[in-house]
Amino acid sequence: MSDATGQQHVTPEGTLDLGRGDPDPALLPLGEVRAAAEHLLSAADATVLQYGAEPGDPAVRAALGRFLRERGAALATPERLFVTAGASSALSLICTRFAARGARVLVADPSYHLALRTFADHGLTVEGLASDADGPLPGALEAALARGPVALLYLVPAFGNPTGATIPPDRARRLVEACARHGVRVVADEVYRLTGFAGPPPASLSAYDPDVVLALGSVSKILAPGLRVGWIEGPERDLAALAETGQALGGGGMNPVTAAVVRDLIEADRLGPQVERVRDALRARYDAVLDALRRALPEAEAAPVAGGYFLWVRVPGFRPDRAEETLARHGLRVAPGTRFAPPLPGPRDDPPVAPAAEPHAERMRLCFAHYAQAELGDAVGRLAAAVREADAGRPEPGRNL
Ligand SMILES: Cc1ncc(COP(=O)(O)O)c(C=O)c1O
């Protein structure tokens, strides 16, 4: 995984990094994956090493479809699935096929920063929509749609990145219906949809209109990111168009070998229990980080979440983007909220924005998936110490007037 600057993500020795978004290695089921790979590769059938079918092997799509239909994605039939090398490659492929250079892409504010990077890679024009805790405001979406053609609306609707929030069904329906009226595709990045630890998974957004939603899934957050296996669930005509891209025609199916490993895990009934283990760990870690925040940093504000990897935290008066050195001295990293403000963070030509107007300046995304409870408690203690130090160095209001 890379950070927002595109650098390979390396955490210095002794630092706890709550800014990352990858699972704890202790949750990666090496033995299960080894057994599935051995089973697959010891079979006499060498065609698993051949180029794969463009949308993915039918047996993989059949197993995946069954798995997903039992978990809130009622429409995930094999014909509506396209196997990819993770959700990132799915998003890139969708941009290649359905969004011409310069086209407009609408996103929630805040948004997953590396999706913003992917849109920039494709020369797309990103527009953040005014949003509340339930996601983009339908009025803001309608206004943006009325301003001219739009290629895509991109959302992380379930246990989102960076806020951990889930778009409630009424809001989700209104957003999808507005896009359907304007013939705009909705890309629902649902990589966290199966990580809910307080009830059954929310319905996939494709339930609201199977003709306009492309729902992205991945094993990265529930099994192992290194397998690079994901999928798109969407209308057959769109999947057929993706199968006609140069990448698919030239390279065939993406990652057929590791996709077959995932199929083996599903067929052996190993993936379901693995998802349960991840959810149990997430629940315990979420409780631990909340508890530590309440004790060490009672002024911290964060909306409760019911799944996912992240908590979107505000400490009034504390600017994480300006405190990176202080945090580093305390052996901690976080993901500053400014990183998630659309359009893509980075040098801008616009005149400098007044600090009070800088979006999400007092927010930080804290990941509770990567470390176990004791380290999370330690990390929150370090955060509290860094906040106290930043407080002590800050002039008191009025002192300099
Ligand atoms: C919202 C979101 N989408 C996609 C990804 C990447 O998924 P994948 O590993 O399947 O490419 C991440 C990982 O952090 C994510 O948070």
Image (cartoon, rainbow, N blue to C red):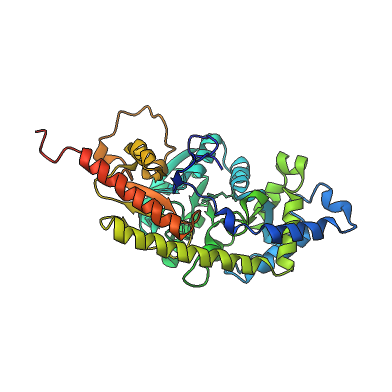
Inspect this view and state whether residue 47 appears: yes
Q: Quadrant of the C terminus?
A: top left
Q: Is residue 66 above or below residue 49?
A: below
Identify the residue at image location x=83%, y=49%: 49
Q: Position of residue 89 (x, y in %)?
A: 62, 45
Q: Position of residue 177 (x, y in %)?
A: 48, 60
- How many marks the image carries: the answer is 0
20 left or right, relative to 143? right
Q: Position of residue 206 (x, y in %)?
A: 56, 62
Q: Position of residue 81 (x, y in %)?
A: 68, 58
Decide which of 266, 38 is in the foreground and name it: 38
Identify the residue at image location x=69%, y=63%: 64
Decide which of 127, 374 is in the foreground and name it: 374
Q: Is residue 401 above or below residue 304?
A: above
Quarter of the rendering containing residue 310: bottom left
Identify the residue at image location x=90%, y=57%: 44
Q: Quadrant of the N terminus?
A: top right
Identify the residue at image location x=70%, y=42%: 245
Q: Is residue 306 above or below residue 249?
A: below
39 left or right, relative to 299? right
Quarter of the rendering containing residue 204: bottom right
Inspect this view and state whether residue 103 appears: no
Q: Is residue 80 above or below residue 99?
A: below
